[in-house]
Image (cartoon, rainbow, N blue to C red):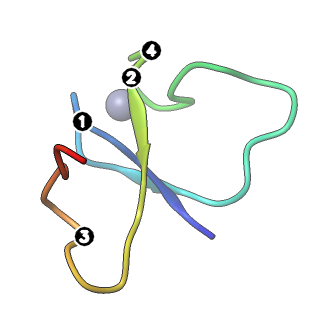
């Protein structure tokens, strides 16, 4: 499963040892979903 930084939009693979984006240092990462990779669900 991949994660996407909402700040810079970079995709990252599984995150283990870091909680920040390894590219920009952003701290908000979302899980990439097959149906809506760029949307954040409200449920
Ligand atoms: Zn980033």
Instruction: Using the numbered discs, state the Cα–Cα distance from disc 2 to disc 1 in whole angstroms.
Output: 6 Å
- As helix, strand or loop, the secondary structure at mark 4 comes to loop
Chain-order first, disc 2 or disc 1: 1
Crowding near the residue tagged with mark 4, few <14, some 14–19, many ≥20 C-alpha atoms within 10 Å: some
Does mark 1's beta carbon lie closer than 8 Å to ligand 1? yes
Question: Which residue is the site of mark 2?
Answer: 28
The reply to whether discs 4 and 3 touch (Cβ–Cβ < 8 Å) is: no
Which one is in front in this view, the residue at disc 4 or the one at disc 3? 3
The reply to whether discs 2 and 1 touch (Cβ–Cβ < 8 Å) is: yes
Instruction: Using the numbered discs, state the Cα–Cα distance from disc 4 to disc 1 in whole angstroms.
Output: 9 Å
Chain-order first, disc 1 or disc 3: 1
- Residue 14: % across, % down: 73, 55
Say the numbered circle drawn on residue 27: 4
Q: Which quadrant is home to the N terminus?
A: bottom right
- Report the residue at 35% width, 85% height from top: 34
- As helix, strand or loop, the secondary structure at mark 1 comes to loop
Instruction: Using the numbered discs, state the Cα–Cα distance from disc 4 to disc 3 in whole angstroms.
Output: 18 Å
Chain-order first, disc 4 or disc 3: 4
11 shown above or below 35: above
10 shown above or below 13: above
């Amino acid at each position: 499963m991949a994660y996407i930084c909402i700040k810079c939009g970079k995709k990252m693979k599984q995150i283990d040892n870091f909680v920040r984006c390894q590219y920009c240092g952003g701290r908000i990462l979302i899980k990439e979903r097959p149906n809506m990779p760029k949307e954040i669900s409200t449920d």
